[in-house]
Image (cartoon, coloured by chain):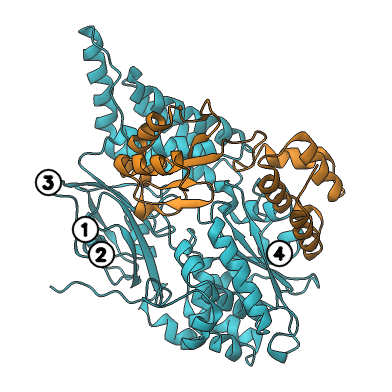
Amino acid sequence: MSTPQEHRLIFKHIDEPGYTNDIDCYLKHGGYEQLKKAVTMKPEDICADVLTSGVRGRGGAGFPAGMKWKFLDRKSGKPIYLVCNADESEPGTFKDRQIIHQDPHQLIEGMMCSAFAIQAKLAFIYIRGEFFQGYKILERAIEEAREKNLLGDNILGTGYSCDIIVHRGAGAYICGEETGLIESIEGNRANPRIKPPYFPAALGLYQCPTIVNNVETLCDVKHIIELGGQGFSEIGTPGNTGTRIWCVSGHVQKPGYYEFPCSAITLGELIYDICGGLKPGRKLKAVIPGGSSAKVLRADERFTGKLKDGTEFDWGIEDIPMDFDSLGLVGSMSGSGGVIVMDDSTDMVEALANINYFYAHESCGQCTPCREGVPWMRKVTQRMVDGEAREEDAQLLKDIADQIAGRTICAFGEAASWPVQSFIAKFNDEFVEKARTQAALRKEGKSTAEKTTLI
Amino acid sequence: MNLKSKTIEKIDKLVPRYPTMKSAALPLCHMVQEDQGYLSNEAVEWIADRLDLQPINILELVTFYPMLRTEPTGKYHVRVCRTLPCALAGAYQTCERLEKEFNCKVGHTSVDGSVTLNFVECHADCGKGPVVMVGEDEYTDIDPDKASELAAKIKNGEI
């Protein structure tokens, strides 16, 4: 069987020798032709194309972008805002960084096409604070585009005006949550808002109708205009259209970013054929397929069930097609496309302790179950790796997680609980074993504190 | 407050671009912090005054966003990502080496004030872990040996 070939749509020019991030290079490669086309179209036709394309949000939730746009409250008479979510903060994800650094004009073109389609009055790029260079690159790119009348006042002589403000975050993961992000732009702490009533499409930024889309999703809009909604929908499979950029990290030979049509490869092909497999002598132990909040998959699991069309499936971890629906069917998610691979040298208790540390650090503190529960889970896993594990800890962790998920304003409660629930469900033995090993050492009068590597 | 004239110019240009003054609060925190190195009480009051807000409106941001700080860092601010993908690539070992090189525990500033060493969460370059930031510059694939090389460059003032 031949190695699947990458199909680069969004990443067409990423890492291409000689390709630079200035506007001249972008124009030479056919840049802004789709914006020129877009402004001759009726805005509602672009929206219809985005709906037809079936493109689903690339930030994590996978909600159809065209549907999100359809919910936009156009009758209120209030100004409409477009926000690009460039917070890219889900651990394991590093695709937006490449677009911002190497091809910023693709994002700006995608944004201006989208802004015209929804008739936005003003657009924002919310970029994470740690992207110091990315911020400067975007600022420069926006000025270049303004000089060529591709954004700002009276764009390309159409009478339509829209500016982009680059707004920097400051190290808070919760700003990736769209209503938290909106609060942050308004100059507040990024405490997410409760939905309903605060669906951004109706009551978003400054209580006005707002669309928040991921960087990659907005780039997709440019390609939807080029290919047409129907043409775009033919990439991938029905319900899983377009390409996805899989960011692979962890214990593989060749970590990196790889773009494929949805469903074009399996998880096994991605790990072994594309990423060169595991390090010599190592075996696959677990994969977190969609950023650190996605539920972990165990290497020796069997996944069975029925596909949407009724056919039965029976997959090993390597057989899972890489798309939204299949990763959902095996109980996890494609999320933001961050595939974290762990080999048999990984201590799963330490790995969970690492993840819990992250979420405890990032809880905004607004909802009690999350503010109290997530640091509690961190304390338990920290105690376990420090040599004080108890046999009942696995159950305790599960109980805490079960009481957080579904009881918070935003999805952070789930994001922090899913790793715990899935690690305990699939690696329970390791958690219990850790406690037993430490108890045995204690009996012998030996130290239970081990040297840790992941926390 | 002795803000550089260039900073004031940038602030004056930015504030009117936002639909509301308050939206400029976080950007101003960044700009003043970059100018002064940290956000003092005086800086917080200055930002509030500039935006017709109360100091508490700024302080509640400073205490929420991890990148905003109320104390100066050492001359070099070294940030090591410790989140899972970087940890799988050996970030904790990298940080241990840096602690030895700078004779400074993570979370602290070296006695001579030259280096502040911090753990930070994911910097979104997980394919090239461990990731280390020195000031605003990113260094990737920093295993312990490369960490020693990086530390040597910092100590020699080469970066």
> How far apart in space, not on screen, are marks 2 and 1 (Cα)?
6 Å
Q: Which chain is cyan?
A: A
Label 1 sits on what residue type?
Glu
Label 2 sits on what residue type?
Thr
The residue labelled by disc 2 is A266
Quadrant in which the N terminus of chain B appears: top right
Which of the two discs, 4 and 1, labels the residue nearer the N terminus? 4
The residue labelled by disc 4 is A202
> How far apart in space, not on screen, are marks 3 and 1 (Cα)?
18 Å
Pick the residue in front: A6 or A56.
A6
Color of chain B here? orange
Label 4 sits on what residue type?
Ala
Side of A130 relative to A307 (left or right): right
Question: Few, some or many C-alpha atoms within 10 Å of disc 2 (few <14, some 14-19, many ≥20)?
Answer: some
Residue at 50% from the left image edge and 82% from the top image edge: A26
Label 3 sits on what residue type?
Gly
Res. A38 in view? yes
Side of A168 relative to A306 (left or right): right
Residue at 38% from the left image edge and 43% from the top image edge: B84
Instruction: Give the quadrant of residue A211.
Output: bottom right
Which of the two discs, 4 and 3, labels the residue nearer the N terminus? 4
Residue at 59% from the left image edge and 40% from the top image edge: B66
Pick the residue in front: A24 or A431.
A24
Disc 4 vs disc 3: which is toward the camera? 3
Evaluate whether label 2 is on the same chain as label 4. Answer: yes
Q: Is label 1 in a helix, a strand or a loop?
A: helix
Which of the two discs, 3 and 1, labels the residue nearer the N terminus? 3
